[in-house]
Amino acid sequence: MLALSLGTLAAVAGRAEGVAVLGPADWAAVRFTLMQALLSAGLSVALAIPVARALARRRFPGRGLLITLLGAPFILPVIVAVIGLLAVFGRGGLVSQALASLGLGPIDIYGLEGVVLAHVFFNLPLATRLILQGWLAIPSERFRLAASLGFTPGDVTRHLERPMLRTVLPGAFLVIFLICMTSFAVALTLGGGPRATTVELAIYQAFRFEFDLGRAALLSLIQFALCAGAAVLAFGVTVSGAMGAGLDRPLARWDAGGYGPRLLDAAWVGLAALFLVLPLAMIVGRGLAGLADLPLSVWQAAGRSLAVALGSAALTLALALPLALAAVRLGGARGAAVQAAGTLSIAASPLVMGTGLFILLFPLADPVALALPVTALVNAAMSLPFALRALTPAVAEAETGFGRLADSLGMTGAARLRLVLWPRLRRPVGFTLGLSAALSMGDLGVIALFADPGQATLPLQLYRLMAAYRMEAAAGAALVLLALSLGLFWIFDRGGRTDAEA
Amino acid sequence: MRTPFLAAGILCATPALAEPPVLTVYTYDSFLSEWGPGPQVEAAFEAVCGCDLRFVAAGDGASLLARLRLEGTRTEADVVLGLDTNLTAAAAQTGLFAPHGIAVPALDLPVAWEDEIFLPYDWGYFTFVYDKTRLPEPPGSFEALIAAPDDLKIVIQDPRSSTPGLGLVMWVKAAYGARAPAIWEGLAPHVLTVTKGWSEAYGLFMDGEADMVLSYTTSPAYHLIAEDDDTKAAAAFAEGHYLQVEVAGRVASSDQPELAAQFLAFMLTDPFQSVIPTTNWMYPAVTPEAGLPDGFQTLIRPAAALLLSAEEAASLRDPALAEWRDALSR
C-alpha cells in the first residue's frame, strides 16, 4: 500500500527535470487547504455526535433506511452531489426561492462557507456511521448495569459514552480531515474562485498545465507530510477502548426516556435527514426526466462500473482484514504504524497515483488494456482507510474480550476467525464491502487518464454526456449511478446486519 | 508431414494478410465519445485508407500534451488531434512533432494560418451564453458587464484546469493588454464561481445558478438544432471575441508517417469537416460543400476576431494567469 502511494510519487519525481521551488501562491493554497479541512472535519464530527447518539438509542420506522441513505452523499460523484446541493442551497435553489417569496434576496454560499457546507454534506454521514459503530460496540450489558445502578443520563455520558467517544472520535476526525485535504473540484466550484485553491489543484496545475513534474511531486509530498502529521496527532490522542465484552444481547436503554431527550433526538435526526435527503431528492427529481431515453452505452458503462466496484470491494477487504489483524496483534506503536500506513493512502493525490502508475506500467504493458483493473486497485487503496476505521476497533474488541479464552482453548487460524472474530466482524465487514463498492462505483478516478472509447465507466460516461451538452441525459445517468451505488451499499451493509437489530 | 506445415503456414500468414496497418490518434475524451465526431470520422477514414484507425482518449487538450510528454518518443501515437493555439508553442518545443508536409487547401478561418507543424480542423469564438427569457438585455462588452448591477452573475472555468477558462484570460489580455488587471477587478463581483471544467460551468448555468456562462458562440446552435430550443443566445462583445483554433499534428516518432499524412489531408476534406458542426459544435476549418447546417446562420458573427500568436500566447500566459488570480483572490 505504501508502494502504491509513495512509489507512484517517487516515479513522478523520478521523471522530473531539475529542482522545484514553491511560490507564495502555493503556500496560500497550503494554508487554505489546511483551514477548510480543519473546519470541515471539526464541524462534521461535532454535528455527527448528537445524530449518532439519537440513532443509537432510538428505534423508529424507517431507521434502517435512513442509516442506508446516510451512506449516499459520501459515495456520490462530486459533480452530482454539487448539483444536488446547489439545487437546495444555490442562488436558484429551494432556500433562495423560499426567501424570495418572503421578499428576501437569494443566499450566496460561494466561498469558504460553501466549501465547508459541501464537505459537511459529504462527511457528516460518514462521521455519523463511524461514531454509531462506536455506540453500538458498547455491550448492552453495560447499559443494563448502568440502569440497575440507577445511573442518570449524565452518569451514562460520563462513564460509558465519553470514554467510547474518546476512542472513536480521533480516527473519525482524521479520516474526514484527510478526505477534505485532497478535495479539489468541490473546493473550487463552491469556493467561488482562486481564493479556494487547494494543494490538489496546485498539483493538477503543475502537472497538467506546466508539466512541471518536480513541482507536482513536491506539492504532493507536502500534502503527504501534512496528512502524516495529522495522522500522528490523531493516533497520539487515541486511547484504546475498555468497554469489555458482552454477549450480544439486544440493546435496551433505560436512561433516555422522558420527553426532553426524545424531542431532542427527534430534532437532531430530523434535521440531519432533511439536510442530507433533500439534495438527494433533488437529484432523483432531476434525473427522472432523463431516465426514459438513456443511450445503451450508459447501461453498458453501468455494467463495467459494477464489475469494477465488486472487484474493488473484494480487494479492499483482502487488504484491510490482514492489516487490521496485524495492527491489533502488534499493538502499541507498531500497530498504530500499520494503521497509519493504511490510512495514508487517502492522502495520496489520485492524479499523482494515476500518473505514477502510468509511468511505471508504460514500459511494461499497455496501460489502456489494464485500465479497469488499475481503476479497481486505486479505488481499493482509496477505500482502505475507511475499511481500517471500521474493522480495527471491532477486531480489537473481539481480541480483548475473547482472545484469552480462545488462546486457552488453543483456537487458531480459520476456526478462530470463524467462531471468535466473524460474529463481531460481520457488521463492519458488511459496511466495508458496501462502502468500498459504492465508493468505487462513483469514482471518476484514474479511468479518465487511461480509458479508450470502449471502456468508459458510468461516471466517465456521465461526464461525456455533459461534455456533449446532454445535461438531461446526464441527470438520468446520475440517478442510475445514485441508485446503483446505494443498492450495492445496502446489499452488503444489510448482509452484515442480518441477525442484528441495528 | 505436409499438412501440419501447410496449416502452420496458413496460421502464420493469415494475421499478416488480414491485419491492416494501425493508425493511432490521441485525442480528447469528448471527441471520441459516441456523441462526438470520433465514430463517424473513424468509419469515413477507414473506408478509404485500408487501415485500422484507433482513437485513444486522454482527458482534454492539455492532458493530451502531458500524456505525450510522459510517453516521449516511445509513444504509440501517430497523430495528436485536439491541441489549440495556447498549447502549440509548448508542443512544438518538445520536438515530438514533425512538419505536416501536406498541401493545405483554402481554409475558412477568420485569421491567416501559417504553421508548418500543426493544421487546424475546427474553430470557434469564446463568448458568454445567456438565456433570453431570463436576461432580455445582455451586456454588449466587458465594460458593460462591469457596469451591470452586481447581481448579474457569470460562471467561468479555471484557466489552470480548463481550455475555455484559459481562453477567457487570453481574451481579456488580447483586448485590454496592460489594462487587463483592472478589467478583472471589475469583473470579480460578477464572477459567481470558477469551475474545474466546461461541463460543470455549463451545468450550473443550465440549472439557473448564473445568468451567463463562458462557452462558445456555437453553443446556441446545439440547443436550436438538437433540442429545438431558441432561448439560448451568445452575447456579442464590442471588443471582439477571442478565437479557439483546434489543431492536429503528426508525431515525429510515428511508424506510419504516410498514413499520418494521409489522415491530416483527409481531415481537411468534406467527410471529416461535414461531421464537425453538429458533433463537436464548432465551425469547420473548411466549410463543407453543402454549407453549414441550418441554424448556424442564426449565430452571432463577431466584428473582430482576436487571437494571440502561439509565441505571444506562450509568453503572456503566466503573467496573465497571475493577474487573473490576484484580481479574483481579493
Image: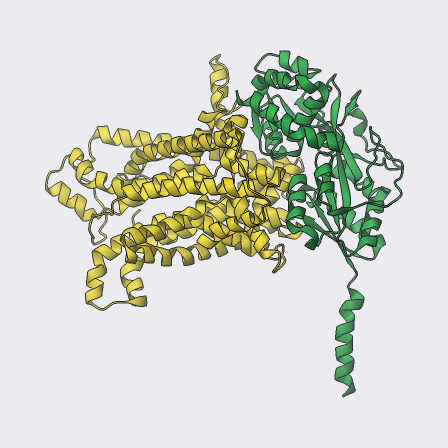
Which one is nearer the viewer's eye here, B210 or B27? B27
**Above-or-below relation of A109 to A461:** above
Name the one closer to the observer, B218 or A365: A365
In the rendered structure, the answer to whether residue A120 lies left or right of residue A197 reads left
Which chain corresponds to the colour green?
A: B
Which quadrant holds the N terminus of chain A?
Answer: bottom left
Name the colouring of the figure: by chain
Q: Measured along the vertical axis of the image, is residue A239 above or below residue B53?
A: above
Residue B262 can be seen in this image: yes
Pick out the residue farthest to the bottom. B1
Outermost left residue: A149
Chain in yellow in the render: A
Residue B138 visible in the picture: no
Query: From what the image shows, is residue B35 above or below residue A43?
Result: below
Nearer-the-camera pick, A143 or B150: B150
Rendered location of residue A84, percent (x, y): 51, 32
Q: Quadrant of residue A334?
A: bottom left
State the residue at coordinates (53%, 46%).
A352
Q: Which of the 4 image quadrants contains residue A92?
A: top right
Residue A333 rendering spot, x and y as whole percentages: 29, 51
> How many numbered marks are there?
0
Of residues A242 and B70, which is closer to you in this image? B70
Q: Position of residue A144 (x, y in %)?
A: 16, 45
Taking the spot 62% from the left edge, 50% from the top edge, the residue there is A451
* Residue A132 screen position, x and y as percent: 31, 42
Apparent side of residue A498 relative to residue A93 in the rendered image (left or right):
left
